[in-house]
Amino acid sequence: MPRAQDLDTTFYVLRGWTAIARVIGPDGNVATPGSTTSIQAIVQRVKAPGTPTHDAALTVGTVVKDPLVTRADDSRWTKDDVGYNFIAELPASAFPSPDHYVVEFRFTPSSGADYSVIYKGGAKSTYNG
């Protein structure tokens, strides 16, 4: 399965996390609600592949945006002036302990092969005591 994007990030133990990205499919086109049939969000520890800490279907119409959302519309987007088309919030329970995690958003397009957007990173404790 081709990967649209692999991205590095930092997660925090027992805190929710929001992915924001401009997703381009293997056909070179920006993903839209009309071109996407389903999206699965899968979170796994790097040291325990095959045992997800989170595995859920996302609602395409909620997480895939068309037109692109720019920083004028959402100040969380700081990458460029073009904008994002994907935003998904994962629960705190997806990152239960300090560890390295892989978050895969598996896209099933209305035509063509499935593809994934993958985030990798360590989960840090937020304890400051």
Image: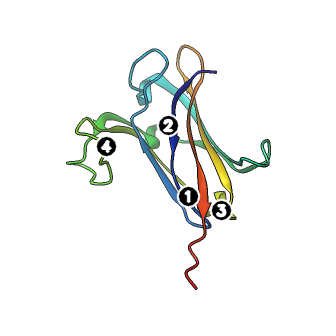
Whether tag 2 and tag 4 are in contact, CB under 8 A, the answer is no
> Among all residues in the image, which is located at the extreme bottom?
129
Label 1: how many Cα within 10 Å (few below 14, some 14–19, many 20+): many
The residue depicted at 65 percent of the width and 62 percent of the height is 93
Whether tag 1 and tag 3 are in contact, CB under 8 A, the answer is no
Image mark for residue 60: 2
The residues bearing labels 3 and 4 have C-alpha atoms spaced at a distance of 28 Å
- Looking at the rendered structure, the secondary structure element under dot 3 is helix
Q: Which residue is mark 4?
A: 79
Amino acid carrying mark 1 in the image: Phe
Image mark for residue 11: 1
The mark that comes first in sequence, 2 or 4, is 2
Please, is residue 18 above or below residue 96 in the view? above
Image mark for residue 93: 3
Front residue of this view, candidates 36 and 18: 18
The residues bearing labels 3 and 2 have C-alpha atoms spaced at a distance of 22 Å
The residues bearing labels 4 and 1 have C-alpha atoms spaced at a distance of 19 Å
The mark that comes first in sequence, 3 or 4, is 4
The residues bearing labels 2 and 4 have C-alpha atoms spaced at a distance of 23 Å
The residues bearing labels 1 and 2 have C-alpha atoms spaced at a distance of 23 Å
The residues bearing labels 1 and 3 have C-alpha atoms spaced at a distance of 12 Å
- Looking at the rendered structure, the secondary structure element under dot 4 is loop
The residue depicted at 45 percent of the width and 38 percent of the height is 61
The residue depicted at 61 percent of the width and 66 percent of the height is 13
Rendered location of residue 108, percent (x, y): 58, 25
Front residue of this view, candidates 18 and 123: 123
